[in-house]
Amino acid sequence: MTVTRMLRWGLLAAFLCVPAVTAAQTAAPAQAPASTSQPAAAQDGFVPVSQLPPTEELAPGPLVLGAYGFIWVAVLVYVWSLARRLNAVQKDFDALSKRQR
Amino acid sequence: MPTPMLQRVFPVALILALVGFVVAPFLIASAPYESTMGLVQKIFYYHAPSGMMMFLGAFVSGTASAIYLMKGRPGADRLAAGAAELTVLFGLIVLTTGPLWARKAWGVWWQWDARLTSSLLVWLMFTSYLLVRKYGGPGSDKLAAAVALFGMANVPFVYISVNVWRTLHPKTTVIPSLVPGMRGPFWFATATFLCLFLALLAVRVRLGERQAELDDLYRAIDDDALEGE
């Protein structure tokens, strides 16, 4: 009973939120024309990469280092997992041979 | 590849892989910069070979699974399981390094286009193969083998997806058309990844064999105990 009531309230809240979100999305472009000094390309939604301000340019170094670093970490974690499983099997073999003696 | 052959290949593959991973960064660093992408294109030298190893793993796992389903050879099952793990490992590398490159080159981390989505699907299929084997209970090895077959069947679609559909991902013609300065480091990195793949597969298959020996030993002890009663 309580769950049904909660679901009902949740649906009602979601239903009420939809117009609010839609209104917020439509209101945002309406404010855009206020800045008349924007270049034409920005008004179309695209800015050439060469015209981006330096703060918006993404440095490639961390991405390259991240990629190469991740490869090493992934391979080493896998090698560690193989070694751990091999050791576990070996321990079981040793335990069995002790038991059989 | 039969298991004894794989075990013989292991030391050679391991040494070549280690040497390769020491030399490859120098070759990659000395390769020319790509004109539009610059430094971030260097990810390509490990990203594309990882993708190739993912495809190779899927092919080996699928083929070995088919043999296991038809002939019931336990060795084929062990090979399939090992290759599936490597498909997941190299797939994870592809699916992580790709977005790091894409963020700079395309401006987005991810795009739901044909190549990226189908690669993710293959990776998910082989992840589910491993999950089915681990948690599926008795008989799950045959169910998992069927999953590997479907995973392998997807690989050609992943490969040709960039040529058939419009995607942000470069076409398959990129590699044959590499400039000589990039071609050498790329194929060197690919050979290094192949050696790593073979070395890891040999160890993983050996692990499967040891686990099977242990299971046989436990079974023999249980049988002896039952006979004693």
Image (cartoon, rainbow, N blue to C red):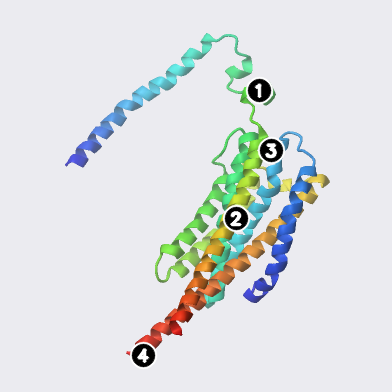
Q: Nearer the viewer, mark 4 or mark 1?
A: 4
* Amino acid type assigned to the residue bearing label 4 in the image: Glu
The residue that mark 4 highlights is B227
Q: Are marks 2 and 1 on the same chain?
A: yes
Structural distance between the alpha carbons of marks 4 and 1:
80 Å
Residue B165 position in % (x across, y down): 61, 44
Q: Are marks 2 and 4 on the same chain?
A: no
Horizontal arrangement in the rendering, residue B224 relative to residue B149 (left or right): left
* Amino acid type assigned to the residue bearing label 1 in the image: Pro
Sooner in the amino-acid sequence: mark 4 or mark 3: 3
The residue that mark 2 highlights is A76
Q: Where the C terminus of chain B falls, by quadrant?
A: bottom left
The residue that mark 1 highlights is A54
Label 1: few (<14), some (14–19) or many (≥20) C-alpha neighbours in 10 Å: few
Pinpoint the chain carrying mark 1: A
Answer yes or no: do the residues labelled 3 and 1 have beta carbons within 8 Å? no
